[in-house]
Every structure is written in C-alpha cells, then in structure tokens.
Image (spheres, rainbow, N blue to C red):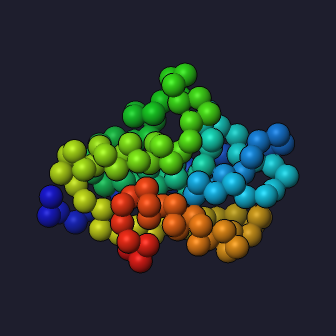
Amino acid sequence: MNDIRVGQGFDVHALVEGRPLIIGGVKIPYPRGLLGHSDADVLLHALTDALLGAAALGDIGRHFPDTDPQWKGADSRVLLRATVKLLSDAGWRIGNIDCTIVAEAPKIAPHAAAICANIAADLGIDIGR
C-alpha cells in the first residue's frame, strides 16, 4: 500500500533473578533478566506492537497471547518475523523504524550494532532504514 503510517509501541517487564536479559534478540550479560511469558524482549515486543498498530492489525496480545502455551518461552524474533509476514500478506511494506530504549542499566551501546543487525534482518530492510 502507498499510505504512510506510523505505529507506536511500548512495552515494560520487571527485572528478575534467574532469567536471561534479551533485548533486540541479543543476550546481554546482566545479573537479572526480564520476566515474561516469552523471552520478554521489550524492544521487539514494542516494535511488533508498533508495526501491527500502524497496519491496523491489532496488537501483540491478539496475535501472540500469553494465554497460549505455544508462545511460552518464545523467541521474540520469531514473533517479529511472523508479524512482518502478516504485514506483507496485507500489502504493507516497512519504510523505516526508530526505537528508543529507556533503561538505567545495563548499557545498551556496546550491543547496539548487533541489535540493529537483528532487527534489520528480521524486517528484511537495510540497516540504514
């Protein structure tokens, strides 16, 4: 479709002991991780919500409900790629994205390139978009 749409995504999870910290599909060394039904990747969850919202296709909870055992422990990159397929099937194309992570710790900068590479690969877009 030729419409230009903007989606807004937001997600938050509690930090807890005994879980890995995964942000943007990257496992980040940290003593605590995010609590959630899936891998609790807040960045990819917010991005997935933004993409679905921009295309008026609902939200992450509608497509990947935490009440469905199929998504227990799911890799959020799988959810993101499934969302890209939903958008493509509906005739949408992703022009660009921009994401902001709000966190006191850990530092994201050392992992930013890997995070961007994961997202670009999953969305099928150039890393500069």
- For this orientation, the residue located farthest to the left is 2
Image coordinates for residue 122, horizontal then vertical, percent? 43, 56
Q: Is residue 60 visible?
A: yes
Q: Is residue 110 above or below residue 54?
A: below
Kindly identify the residue that appears in the image at 52 percent across and 53 percent down.
44
In the picture provided, is 106 more to the left or to the right than 82? right
Q: Looking at the rendering, in which quadrant would you find the C terminus?
A: bottom left
Image coordinates for residue 68, horizontal then vertical, percent? 50, 23
Q: Is residue 49 visible?
A: no
Q: Quadrant of residue 23?
A: bottom right
Q: Is residue 70 above or below residue 22?
A: above
Kindly identify the residue that appears in the image at 18 percent across and 51 percent down.
91
Image coordinates for residue 21, horizontal then vertical, percent? 72, 51
Kindly identify the residue that appears in the image at 70 percent across and 63 percent down.
103
Along the viewing direction, whichever of 91 and 50 lies nearer the viewer? 91
Q: Is residue 24 above or below residue 96?
A: above
Q: Looking at the rendering, in which quadrant would you find the N terminus?
A: bottom left
Image coordinates for residue 7, horizontal then vertical, percent? 36, 58
Kindly identify the residue that appears in the image at 64 percent across and 65 percent down.
102
In the picture provided, is 63 more to the left or to the right than 40? left
Q: Quadrant of residue 40?
A: top right
In the picture provided, is 44 more to the left or to the right than 35? left
